[in-house]
Image: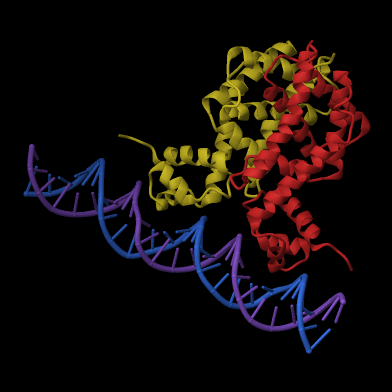
Chain colours: A red, B yellow, C blue, D purple
Amino acid sequence: MASNKRDDIMTAAILLFAERGYDATTVPMIADNAKVGAGTIYRYFENKEALVNALFQECIQKFLEAFQSTSVVTTKDVREQFHVLFNVMVDYAKHNTHALHFIDSHCSGHYLDEQSKQIFQEFLGFLKSFIEHGKEQGVLCLLESDALIAIVYGAFSNLFRLIRVGVIQESPELLNSIEECCWNAIRIH
Amino acid sequence: MASNKRDDIMTAAILLFAERGYDATTVPMIADNAKVGAGTIYRYFENKEALVNALFQECIQKFLEAFQSTSVVTTKDVREQFHVLFNVMVDYAKHNTHALHFIDSHCSGHYLDEQSKQIFQEFLGFLKSFIEHGKEQGVLCLLESDALIAIVYGAFSNLFRLIRVGVIQESPELLNSIEECCWNAIRIH
DNA sequence: ACAATAGGAATGAATATTCATTCCTATATA
DNA sequence: TATATAGGAATGAATATTCATTCCTATTGT
């Protein structure tokens, strides 16, 4: 059948990297989970580092695309913008179970190459532009943008970790409440 | 002088573990930074895993003690309680530069033993009791306690990462704003 | 049959751990 | 006080283990 080995490897790798971290994940481990031979991995990726970088970049890329395919950019109302943004994050977290955790725990890894760092900066820049707009409109706290991003993103990724682990149960109401909490954290009162 | 080797090792280890993670930190690396021979580490700790567990437990222990030496327990007003709690966290983060990051990035590590997991649960339990009280008083959101903790703790630790890295500058005003943001995230509106 | 692809045992480098030896320091002895 | 000695502490080179990567063989598809 036409099963794509590269995808199999990527899928296995993201799960292991997210759960155990880059350094504690061995190449044979990835091979086993992907049901391929260890050598096969080297047909698709130059080495372990190239694999983690490819994975990281594709994760961020997908995330960016998800944002860009919405009305975040055109919507004027900041609260409404936040809602769209938050939804994108929720959908992303739902459909790419381990991606969020993987990004979160690998975004300052010593193995990331320039391109990975750059696309991650691009990603942060995107979020920043939203924050800056909200501040200009007098709707968001006048804290440094990086700080506001850290608050929302930190809370969000920590929460989804709990959901993934099963400590708390996902539901539309829960997600709504969380969105409200995150919004309340950064808006002006 | 009476330099304590065990402390030297602990100090070197927490920095390296926090910055590079458990698996990317080698024992000789720790030995070098602590200015002791590699073998010396094994006089004080059975192995690398025992070292990381001792470190983890002592970090949490200190954190718990910091909480217990305050008026968190006796104060009645929830907002005032939160203020005390937040201050303890800030002080802890300031005085134990790497401890917060170390705890955060190692609290679900595959190398943690039962005792480490248990003391961490105890720590969460402590935070939980504060949250529950606030909910009973009708002051805090009726979200699951774990979720509320995740929001505040996630935001907090993410922010202090930025401060540590130097992206944002620490100042009393900044800390006040952050406290306000975190409080707004979980209080009822 | 040939070419491309996959597999996984073999390799070598990196790393945790051990251990024979040296170094201190405190106490005893003269 | 000066010297000898014992025993714990420290060392870092040597060893055992783990892991990324390679390479040769088997399999698949055309």
Is C27 left, or right, of A174 in this rendering? left
Q: Nearer the viewer, residue B54 or A103?
A: A103
Q: Is residue A46 above or below residue B80?
A: below
Quarter of image, res B4: top left
Residue B64 visible (yes or no): no
Label count reads 0
Residue A62 in percent (x, y) is at 81, 43
Quarter of image, res A132: top right
Q: Quadrant of the N terminus of chain A?
A: bottom right
Quarter of image, res B60: top right
Q: Is residue C7 above or below residue B63?
A: below
Residue at (44% x, 37% y) in the render: B7
Q: Nearer the viewer, residue A188 or A46?
A: A46
Q: Quadrant of the C terminus of chain A?
A: top right
Residue at (73% x, 50% y) in the render: A55
Is A30 left, or right, of A24 in this rendering? right
Residue B62 in percent (x, y) is at 56, 29
Residue D12 in percent (x, y) is at 35, 56
